[in-house]
Amino acid sequence: MSRLADMLKDAGVVAFFALLVFAPFIGVQLGSNLRGALTLAPTPMTLAVAVAVVFCARLAVLTLAQHRAAVTLPRMPVRVQDYLAPAMLVLGVVLPFLPFLPNAYIDTATLILIYVMLGWGLNIVVGLAGLLDLGYVAFYAVGAYSFALLATNFDLSFWECLPIAGILAACWGIFLGFPVLRLRGDYLAIVTLAFGEIIRLVITNWVSLTGGPNGILGIPHPTLFGLKFTMSADPGTFAGFFHIDPTPRQHLTFLYYIILALALITNWVTLRLRKQPLGRAWEALREDEIACRSLGINVRNTKLTAFAIGAMFGGFAGSFFATREGFISPDSFVFMESATVLSIVVLGGAGSQLGVVLAAIVMAGVPALMQSLQIYRMLIFGLALVAIMVFKPRGFIAQRRPSVTLGATKRIGAEFISQGRG
């Protein structure tokens, strides 16, 4: 009985603070009278419902906490993980050719793959090297603006600018890595967050180069061996060369396969690097930096390579984003993008490639398909994070294979990773 009283008291305190927070926002409604003057009308019923929901949610969380073992979500079976990745790959390859699939779904799948690529790039820094980066959007912006400026000023194609954008983003990754060599944890997060904001402010205020808040227009789209994707069948276009009727789906499908190829290359390179000495050094750095130094590993180079390679993939994704949209502005590279990518890595399970894909589908695909939920995007992020931290604190994929094993291959639970056994 005393336990129930404590739970009710705790839920009541939480509801009281919710009342204080919600009162200025939910408790009043902005309107206008007949003369056009603004008025504030109280909405006590809406406020009461919101506070009641908070009270009940807190009470439910406390109740579930007493029976954590009974409500913990089960791990994904090993055999399911082995077959899920190939099945998703096959689905990704044949997706544009599925009958009766609307063009909007292909465009949404392209958006998901952009976040998958960003998630895999950040997973190198956060999941493998254990370096918390809150400014990953800066490399995304560097890649986008590098391609946009090179393409519009020097008339270079997407394929010529793509490696340049990646190299420039990698250079900025090294530039960020040097000042934070001695930082870890919260301090590293603060510095990387500041770096992302600095890049955004630079591209906003350097009007003569970046166009400032107006952004850059007229960014060219990629071509297929010089063939353009337009709505005409003129010579030099994809439809004209193959003598077919031009449709918007042709351009969408081409963009989809470009980002699919870039994402698969990112995944392949990451998996290969994890089995190399560099990847093992990243994991050693993640487990214990002091032990890493004692083994003779160059911590400086290990951190710089993690930042550089992760930033390079972010630059590739930014370059594709610019050519897909045809227009970029500073509003596309706010902190929210970094938070989204980091949420994808955390929800999927740090270090898990498959987990990043699943989290990107949930975090980017679901809101995109349900346009009416766009205004609740932050609420969805918060609820997803809370639910995962309660039921799956290690993410969707809570276990992974060791990169290198001696003898039989074994799977290690994620609960051992932080203890130097992963």
Image (spheres, helix red, strand yellow):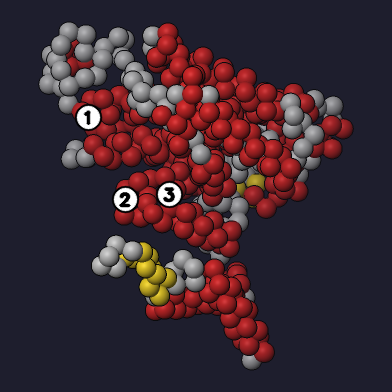
Which residue is painted at 42% across and 78% down in the image?
44
Tag count: 3
Residue 137 or residue 184, whichever sits in front? 137
At x 39% / y 54%, what residue is drawn? 375
| Secondary element at tag 1 | helix
Q: Nearer the viewer, mark 1 or mark 2?
A: 2
**From where the camera sits, is residue 178 visible?**
yes
- Binning the other alpha carbons within 10 Å of mark 2 as few (below 14), some (14 to 19) or many (20 upward) gives few
Give whichever of 394, 105 is nearer the camera: 105
The amino acid type found where label 3 is placed reads Val
Mark 3 surroundings: few (<14), some (14-19) or many (≥20) residues within 10 A: some
**Mark-to-mark CA distance, 3 and 1:** 24 Å
Label located before the other in sequence (3 or 1): 1
> Residue pushed farthest right?
294
Vertical arrangement, residue 26 with respect to residue 389, above or below: below
Q: Secondary structure at mark 2?
A: helix
Assess whether mark 2 and mark 1 are in contact (beta carbons under 8 angstroms).
no
User: Which residue of the protein is positioned furthest toward the bottom in this rendering?
Assistant: 1
Which corner quadrant holds the N terminus? Answer: bottom right
The residue labelled by disc 1 is: 249
Amino acid at dot 1: Arg
Residue denoted by label 2: 371
Q: Is residue 145 visible?
A: no
Residue appearing at x 26%, y 39% in the figure: 104
Mark 2 or mark 3: whose residue is earlier in sequence: 3
- Which residue carries the number 3 mark? 362
Q: Residue 82, relative to residue 319: is it above or below?
A: below
**Is 218 rendered above or below residue 104?**
above
Quadrant including the C terminus: top right
Please provide percent x and percent y for residue 228: 26, 15
Instruction: Give the image location of residue 298, x and y in percent.
Output: 80, 25
Q: Position of residue 197 (x, y in %)?
A: 59, 36
